[in-house]
Image (cartoon, grey):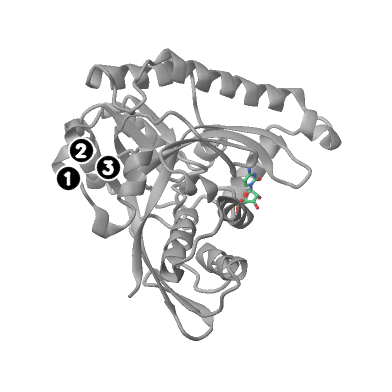
Amino acid sequence: MATAIRSYAKINIGLKIGPKREDGFHELRTIYQTIELADMVRVDFQRGVGIDINCKDNRVPSDESNTCWRVADRVLKALKTRGKVKITIEKNLPVQGGLGAASSNAVATMIALEKELKRQLSAEDRLRIAAEVGSDLPLFLMGGTVLGTGRGEQVFPLQDLPSFHCVVATPDVGVSTPVAFAEWDKKWPAKLSRHHLTDPDSSDRINTFSRSVYEWLNGSNFSATGVPSQGWDRAEALLLDLVRTGIENDFESVVFPKYPAIREVKRALERSGAKYVSLSGSGSAVYGLFTDQETATQAARQLSENDVPAQATVTLPRARYWSELFPAAKTYEMGRDAKIG
Ligand code: C5P
């Protein structure tokens, strides 16, 4: 029997682009946060050979260029196993949206394939395979609130943020991540390319971001369970703190001028009562964090009425990320979300 697994999306709460490294990647600092919006992935292991990928959305490749294919291939090799892997992806998330969908699909494939094989990779092998396939994969081996460093692939679990109401808008614009990085390089050319790694401006930006994150997380005294100690007021304080500390996404400064429609979506979310609004990754997804469900639902409805696809959801703390990964284990009722703060 195939193993079905949810493949959750992420948003980036702040993203600082640092120096371009000798390997061509950029040093990054970001906070990843998983959210409840998800694709569904099904993995079936049978006798035979090969890796088959099925997805009704024909923008999703079915060959080796698919991150799921690359992960499945590496998992089989690491476990010295042969067989036929059938992967079915039910798409709900945008294909090129800054929500990490392809990366998440790939990690979901890894976890489901291990279950199908009834064998486990070591934690080191999991992280190695994830990082080899892409910078945005390892975060999905952690879930919840995660600090990303290096090229984004070095991940550290942070104290989980409370679950915020969240509206994710996905304007119908495909933003290419490599192109966005190239635009950034044009905007901030390093003085001497061989000094990229030590460029003081870039390094400063990274350090400032790390300090801001520290200040934000420490300034807001929420409890270790991720549930604010004093109801919604604490969540609201946390979000206002986020704005006050100036944590933002560097990609906005190159993506918004090129795609003014995306900036308009940010403005619309701000007008509709979001406490914090940002581009996710290199876009085109824009999200807003809200302290109440009603305002969030209303904001999503308004955007949809103006032909901008938008969905109201919640951010997903680590414990829920893991407990609800397999559909059969879904243990909560939808109505409970309204009270999670
Ligand atoms: O690792 P991933 O496949 O997500 O990266 C896609 C592309 O984005 C890379 O080939 C690189 O051009 C760019 N990138 C970068 N710096 C990063 C992450 C990605 O320049 N930290």
- Contact? badges 2 and 1 (CB < 8 Å): yes
Residue, disc 3:
313
Q: CA distance from mark 2 to mark 1?
A: 6 Å
In the image shown, does 20 or 262 lie closer to the viewer?
A: 20
Residue sticking out furthest to the bottom: 48
Which residue extends farthest left? 335
Residue 167 drawn above or below residue 55: above
Residue at the location (61% across, 70% down)? 77
Query: 276 or 209, which is in the foreground?
Result: 209
Q: Secondary structure at mark 2?
A: helix
Q: Position of residue 255 (x, y in %)?
A: 53, 40
Q: Residue at x 77, y 27 (%)?
A: 199
**Dot 2 or dot 3, earlier in sequence:** 3
The residue located at (35%, 43%) in the rendering is 35
Give the residue pinned by disc 1: 334
Q: Is residue 305 left or right of residue 114?
A: left
Cα distance in 3D space between marks 2 and 3:
9 Å
Amino acid type at circle 2 is: Asp
Position of the N terminus by quadrant: bottom left
Q: Secondary structure at mark 3?
A: strand
Which of label 2 and label 3 is nearer to you? 2
Q: Is residue 213 above or below residue 138?
A: above
- Does residue 20 appear in the picture of this structure? yes
Specify the label residue 89 is tagged with.
Answer: none
Q: Quadrant of the image for the C terminus?
A: top left
Badge 2, how many Cα within 10 Å: few under 14, some, many 20+? some
> Secondary structure beneath disc 1?
helix
Q: Position of residue 243 (x, y in %)?
A: 42, 20
* Residue on which the image places disc 2: 337
